[in-house]
Amino acid sequence: MSLIVDEHRQYLADPHRLAAFERAITATVKPGDVVIDLGAGTGILGLFACRAGAARVYAIDDGSIIGLARELCRANGYSDRVVFVKGLSSRIALPEKADVAVSDQIGRFGFEAGVWEYFTDVRARLLTPQASTVPRRVELWMSAVEAPALFEQVEFWSTRPAGFDVSPARVLAVNTGYPARLDEEQLLAEPALLASLDLAEPEPPSIGAAAELTVERAGTLHGLGGWFRAELAPGIYMSNAPGDASRIDRRNVFLPLDRATPVAPGDRIRVRLRILPSEVMLRWHVTIETAAGDGKAVFSHSTAAGMLLALEDLARTRPDYVPRLSPWGLARRTLLTLCDGRRPLAEIESELCRRHPELFASPAAAAGFVAEVVTRYA
Ligand SMILES: C[S@@+](CC[C@H](N)C(=O)[O-])C[C@H]1O[C@@H](n2cnc3c(N)ncnc32)[C@H](O)[C@@H]1O
């Protein structure tokens, strides 16, 4: 079985997630509505919409899972109501406007899986002006975290594996957000609401947020923990928050600090966050003070500083760089030209291999390359 199918099994095996979406979709979709299931996966959210009385569901997914979604739909007797569209939501057009869009593109920290960006596009092009979205709002929450085991992912780079100095990697490690399942016992402070994203508003290029956390117990601060709470429909919520009784099976994010810092009850942790949602970029600035106001530590981190950038790739971003196609680029250009609406696949593979013998020894050797380009662009 493909690992993609197993990933979707995990989505379907999460009773809290399914219950929240079913309640929200039942509360939102009215009989006769047209619904967009954005990032349909197995099509489960569209099936909920059918059950709620939708006249038509457009199930959109850019992955091959859409084939399985079609079969599951047939197995449940809704084939006459669901139209399957394989493609990126931002690149497709539909024959009618929809009344509701549903999606679970909510990242671990709420913003980073694209829900806001996709809904902004869908709202502008594919929804009626009064349409609803599920979710309608996403909140970003944060707390201070004691997590020695997670912090080892940073500290590893100060050790000497096989006797070698690997410390140049530490700066990357400490500027990275790590997926992690945080428990309530690891939190050092009452969680704070950082931002509430109204999905009816267009996505802004950047979001600033600030919070002050007060330490409640003595411990060691290793970093910040982030999670979300989504309002799927008025009064119906879904969250991956540590300690939430209906917590869904989605990890949180751990944002480390450069140095593990002992903290005491009453210490204040001031957090400033800058998020660039469409670039999935995050900056966290943290100031720690005692209850009396004495400074303890200041940290500044950014996922931009955690990116692996090769000098060769950086050079390619300079405005004066003159690009020239590589042999694989030339082959792709040939292939795109050969897809002229007349040639069958077998002829394209033979011709590609004739024109680029240095890359493809036989038409069979070209088949994988052709399939990859054709499924994406043709
Ligand atoms: C988290 S899964 C959710 C699947 C399903 N909606 C559910 O609730 O179980 C996300 C799915 O969305 C698809 N996807 C993500 N972004 C997309 C986009 N912009 N357009 C189309 N499909 C997208 C992925 O291929 C994946 O199958």
Image (spheres, rainbow, N blue to C red):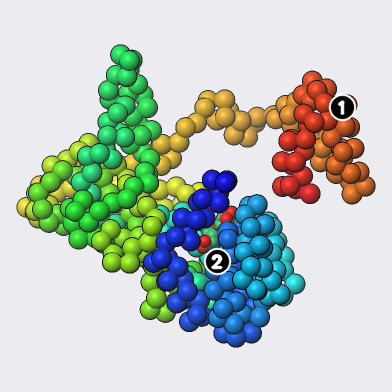
Quarter residue 296 falls in? top left
Secondary structure state at the residue bearing disc 1:
helix
Q: Position of residue 280 (x, y in %)?
A: 47, 49
- Direction right: furthest residue: 342
- In this rendering, is residue 72 above or below 349? below
Q: Is residue 21 visible?
A: yes
The residue at 88%/26% (across/down) is 354
Quadrant for ligand 1 reads bottom right
Residue nearest the viewer, comparing 370 with 89: 370
Q: Earlier in the sequence, mark 2 or mark 1?
A: 2
The residue at 10%/53% (across/down) is 217
- Direction bottom: furthest residue: 31
Q: Amino acid at mark 1?
A: Arg
Which disc number belongs to residue 355? 1
Q: Position of residue 312 (x, y in %)?
A: 57, 25
Q: Position of residue 46 (x, y in %)?
A: 58, 70
Secondary structure state at the residue bearing disc 2:
helix
Q: Are marks 2 and 1 in contact (CB under 8 Å)?
A: no
The residue at 40%/48% (across/down) is 282
Q: Is residue 283 visible?
A: no
Q: Is mark 1 within 8 Å of ligand 1?
A: no
Q: Left of 326 or right of it: where is 211?
A: left
Q: Position of residue 307 (x, y in %)?
A: 45, 36
The residue at 47%/58% (across/down) is 11
> Which is more foreground, mark 2 or mark 1?
2
Q: Amino acid at mark 2?
A: Ile
Q: CA distance from mark 2 to mark 1?
A: 45 Å
Q: Is mark 2 within 8 Å of ligand 1?
A: yes
Q: Left of 88 or right of it: where is 138?
A: left
Q: Label 2 belongs to which residue?
A: 44
Q: Around disc 1, counting alpha carbons within 10 Å, would you say few (fewer than 14), some (14 to 19), or many (20 or more)? A: few
- In this rendering, is residue 175 above or below 37? above
